[in-house]
Amino acid sequence: MRDLLLLAGGILGLFSFCLYSYLGVQNRLTELKIRLPELEREILLLGEENQKLAYEAKECSTPARLIEKASLPEFAHLRHPLLQEVVTVQETVVASNE
């Protein structure tokens, strides 16, 4: 009889441990489900901000805008390079026998 009670107690303890760990997993899953909409909104906002910054970068690098900036006093020290200062590198194609 004593062995049967010990066995029943062991099985009950094991079942309790499994149930406790399952509840922990379910709590973690519920926590992640709650955070998911917040993260989706954050991703959407970051995507919109990324598009805005890409548009601003594209607008700032237009030739007319660059010429306009070149005439500003903070860029007065910049100058166009002379032809002798421009270095060109020719590309060579090497055929391989593989």
Image: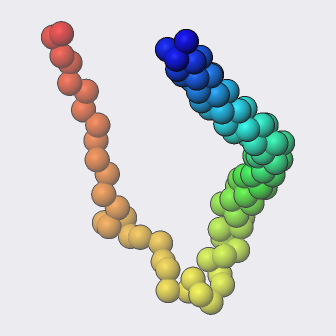
> In the image, residue 16 lies at what x, y percent?
64, 28
User: Would residue 34 be seen by someone viewing this image from the given angle?
Assistant: yes
Query: x, y percentage for residue 55?
Result: 76, 54
In this figure, what is the number of numbered marks?
0
Quarter of the image that includes the N terminus: top right
Front-most of residues 60 and 40: 40
| Residue 48 shows in the view | no
Give residue 86's position: percent from left, percent from top.
Answer: 34, 61
Compared with 29, 41 (above or below) is below
What residue do we see at 50% from left, 86% from top? 77
* Front-most of residues 45 and 8: 8
Using the rendered view, name the quadrant where residue 94 is placed. top left
* Location of the C terminus (image quadrant): top left
Identify the residue at horizontal 18%, vertical 16% (top origin): 96
In this view, the residue in front, 25 or 74, is: 25
What residue is shown at x 32% (from left), y 67% (from top)?
85
| Residue furthest front in the image | 1
* Residue 21, x across and y down, in percent: 62, 32
Q: Is residue 4 left or right of residue 43?
A: left
